[in-house]
Amino acid sequence: MNKILIIFGTRPEAIKMAPIVLGFKNDPAFDVKVCVTAQHREMLDQVLEFFNIEPEFDLDIMQTSQSLHSLTARLLEGVKVVLDEYQPDYVFVHGDTTTSMAASLAAFYSSIKICHIEAGLRTYNIYSPFPEEINRRVTGLLANYHFAPTSTAEKYLVREGVNPSNIIITGNTVIDALLSSVERIKNGYSNEEILSLEEMIVVGKKIILVTGHRRENHGEGFRNICDALSSLAERDDVQIIYPVHLNPKVKDVVYERLSNRENIKLIEPLSYASFIWLMNESYLILTDSGGVQEEAPSLGKPVLVMRDTTERPEAVEAGTVLLVGTNMDEILSKCNKLLSDEKFYGSMSQLNNPYGDGHATERVIHFMKNNMHLDKTPNNLVGKSK
Ligand code: UD1
Ligand code: UDP
């Protein structure tokens, strides 16, 4: 039986890999194990709990204020031990984190085939997102199979010389996770956090939901974002709710500048289900997150992205996402426009998601079932990228 090892370490990877884990584990054709690097800890664990995933391997790697260098070194060493023990035929990684890049490199050094979920996103600017653009390109260089969420991602991979028969357009698994979770919430799922959010929300005010963590925004970018939020909070028709990322480089600035402000609630990162619930209650979303940009169009919520570049141009083209950077005036002017201009708000809040239809996982599993035998034939070229 083919042995598959699914490796991830951060909150967004866990959310986007959860449907893949559950799909493979439900299929008797595969022997599947999960390795969490725990590049994140609390923010990862809440996702594992919600999806009821119990990893067979947990590297428990996170350290407070970890540097990219020591993180990468510990990941390479840690993943090697798991590869030696389980000896998988295939390693699955996701997206653009340092966990994905280092796990791919470790698998490559061990001559194990690599399957890359959410492959092919690009800005072609190595400093934005940093270090994710390079993490994703390195992973793509090492991968044997590239599961691209959109035709734009496929186009980039082909242009870079990847064999088209090794690229599979699947849609993004973030939509698989979202739709199944929305359904669970509709069917009565609740938790303490949702109950306390219900109490926190001020009836009659428009909720502006904020998240942010990007390394290229640390420092000046976050100071500008805080100043914009501070100014926005002077409006008495809004309530800003901001689940603050646990990275001290984010948390320290945000709490220092925005604590005890009228109309601003700073809270701990929410569990995934609570966050979806709150997105649904929001009027608009202000974020630099990749995953949130992909989720919001399914809920019909306008998103202002506090970045200058995006590797996710599809929703920008569809008109539901707008790049505003970290310039205070630009953030304020677009928020104010969305709050006062109904036509503008209407144009950005259509229910239309270019990132997927909720069936990405099925496409991944279908491809693996139908193509893995080719990897066993001698001198095959199928497993090679180029
Ligand atoms: C990481 C990823 C980024 C991804 C983001 C999602 C890299 C280099 N960065 O960025 O691509 O978009 O996750 O959120 O792979 N921390 C905690 N508890 C947690 C999580 C983080 O305390 O559960 C704190 C720790 O002090 C940790 C720090 O946050 O050292 C930074 O975590 P790290 O994973 O290095 O970077 P992120 O900014 O979270
Ligand atoms: N999310 C969450 N709790 C929060 C904020 C976000 O569970 O308090 C989820 C959100 O639904 C999305 C993912 O985390 O699926 C995005 O993660 P993040 O912004 O940390 O990373 P990125 O997507 O930018 O890599």
Image (cartoon, grey):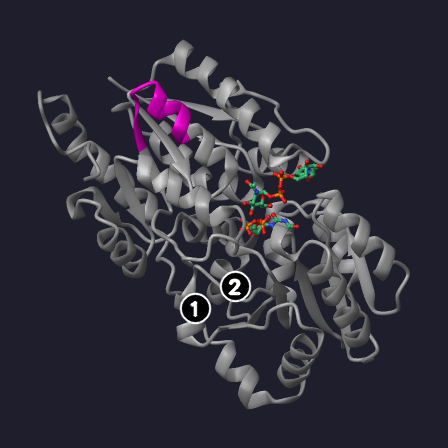
Highlighted magenta segment, given as a residue range: 104-114
Residue 177 location (% of width, % of height): 46, 47
Q: Which residue: 64% across, 72% down?
A: 283
Q: Which residue: 86% across, 55% down?
A: 256
Left or right, residue 385 beside residue 119: left
Give the residue type that dot 1 points to: Ala
Q: Nearer the viewer, mark 2 or mark 1?
A: 1
Q: Quadrant of the C terminus?
A: top left
Whether residue 256 is situated above or below residue 368 in the rendered picture: below
| Magenta residue check for 322 | no
Residue 75 location (% of width, % of height): 53, 25
Instruction: Quadrant for residue 61, please give it.
Output: top right
Instruction: Quadrant for residue 93, please give it.
Output: top left
The reply to whether the C-beta atoms of the residues labelled 2 and 1 are less than 8 Å apart is yes
Please tell me the numbered disc located at residue 296: 2
Whether residue 143 is situated above or below residue 347 in the rendered picture: above
Q: Which residue: 61% across, 66% down?
A: 306
Q: Which residue: 57% across, 56% down?
A: 289
Please tell me the numbered disc located at residue 315: 1
Q: Residues within 10 Å of mark 2 (few under 14, many from 20)?
A: many
Report, in whole angstroms, how far the alpha carbon at label 2 lies from the one at label 1.
Answer: 10 Å
Left or right, residue 149 beside residue 320: left
Whether residue 64 is situated above or below residue 83 in the rendered picture: below
Q: Residues within 10 Å of mark 1 (few under 14, many from 20)?
A: many
Q: Quadrant of the N terminus?
A: top left
Say which label, 2 or 1, has the lower sequence index. 2
Whether residue 317 is situated above or below residue 124 in the rendered picture: below
Q: Secondary structure at mark 2?
A: helix
Give the residue type that dot 2 points to: Ala
| Magenta residue check for 106 | yes
